Image (tube, grey):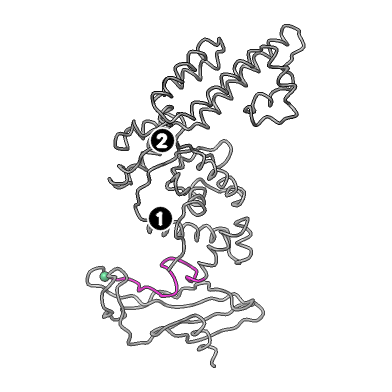
Amino acid sequence: MQDTKLFETILGLQPPWHISRVALDTTGERVDLWVEHAVDERWTCPECAEAPAILAVRDHADERVWRHLDTCQYQTFLHARVPRVDCPTHGVRQVRAPWAEARSRFTLLMERLIIDLILQCSTVTGACRIAGITWDEAWGVMGRAVGRGRARKAARPIPYLGVDEKAFRKGQRYHTIVCDLGQATVEFVAEDRRTESLAAYYTQLTEPQRQAVQAVAMDMWDPYIRATREGLTDGHTRIVFDRFHIMREMTKAVDTVRKQEHRGFLRAGDASPLTGTKYLWLFSDERRPARHAESFAALQALNLKVGRAWAIKEALRTLWTYRQGAAVRRFFTRWYGWARRSRLEPVKQVAAILKRHLDGVLRFAKHPITNGVAEGLNSKIMSIKRKAGGFRNPSNFTTAIYFHCGGLDLYPR
Ligand SMILES: [Zn+2]
């Protein structure tokens, strides 16, 4: 078998294309293949998709090179001058080469391999090393993969959404991340956390999609609230404030009460019973390790302010066990009265915030959703950050989130 025939077979190259020359460089460990087409071949304009191939070659583009899968240990490159046609509708266009996507420097098979390597390797640099490609080439492949995946994505209804924010580096601007709570996929990423950031997601939904949204889990963050009120059908009735976010606020309030009380003891020149107890107060009742049971009971017996704050926080957790609107409202009224009378300023502040956002807090009874799934995605995003070894810019972070969490069909066809 001739070497040209051998490569045509393993490349799956079909007429009118054939390999005209093979060059083997044993010191450089590379194989170069020149691909040509039959002279009298007729072509289709790439933009007139189904048109018959009737156009003659006008001229040829300059020679281009595509990296293909290695031939054993040799890097392998395809060279070709792609013909250009003069379409009566679209003007001069380069025909589509069957082995690559437009603007890619890799063949389809090589691009698939790179996508698989980036998905599987623990770092992007690792994938680069195995494939023998540069960091920029890897990000180019990821960007194109995300582009085609998003273009292919069907507009399906998503009943439950979660909106969350994520900084790609400490001290950097936040990204807004919208996910499908049912499928645990990231649906949308915006490189800020303003009203417009989330509004941009709602705007690109189809009308049936906008109406299909039952509820959106989010933090009590005004820009997201505003965007949802304005962007969805009956938007103000779709908001569910995330219980984990609320409990985080409440736990912070307990910690503030502890700090103030601890400082009070020290100022008075007393030994503080709160020394070294910070983490004891952060546990929920059932998460507290058994070895702390005695010391915690002893602290509770002291009737401290932080003990009261903690009890109020623990009581609030019951709110998410109700499934009926009237019952949960009664519960909240009682709890709120207790918090208001507590004379604990940080606790009263959180209670006031909950009261102000009450409908969205209590709507959990009807739509029991949380950003718990989004939090799971968040830990995946954390690992993406480690994997990328530092994003050089915010848009690379966006690309990586879609690439790994978007549930997209990434491969070229
Ligand atoms: Zn055309």
Nearer the viewer's eye, disc 1 or disc 2? 2
Mark 2: amino acid: His
**Residue 149 forms part of the magenta stretch:** no
| Residue 106 picture location, percent across and down | 50, 69
| Residue 320 picture location, percent across and down | 49, 29
Q: Where does the N terminus fall, quadrant-wise? A: bottom right
Does the CB distance between marks 1 and 2 fall below 8 Å?
no
> What's the residue at 62%, 77% (across, down)?
74
Instruction: State the residue in front, 263 or 342.
Output: 342
So how many labels did they put on this image?
Answer: 2
What numbered label is drawn on residue 150? 1
Mark 1: amino acid: Arg
Mark 1 → mark 2, Cα distance in angstroms: 29 Å
Q: Earlier in the sequence, mark 1 or mark 2?
A: 1
> What's the residue at 39%, 85% (across, down)?
15
Ligand 1: image quarter: bottom left
| Residue 180 picture location, percent across and down | 43, 46
Instruction: State the residue in front, 6 or 102.
Output: 6
Q: Is residue 192 above or below residue 267?
A: below
Secondary structure at badge 1 equals helix
Instruction: State the residue in front, 233 or 41.
Output: 233
Q: Is mark 2 within 8 Å of ligand 1?
A: no
Res. 306 image quadrant: top right
> What's the residue at 56%, 19% (across, down)?
312
Please identify the residue farthest to the top as the structure is shown: 268
- Image check: 181 left or right of 389? left
Extent of the magenta region? 92-109
Secondary structure at badge 2 equals loop
> What's the residue at 43%, 19% (across, down)?
330
| Residue 145 picture location, percent across and down | 46, 60
Which residue is under mark 2?
A: 367
Instruction: State the residue in front, 190 or 315.
Output: 315
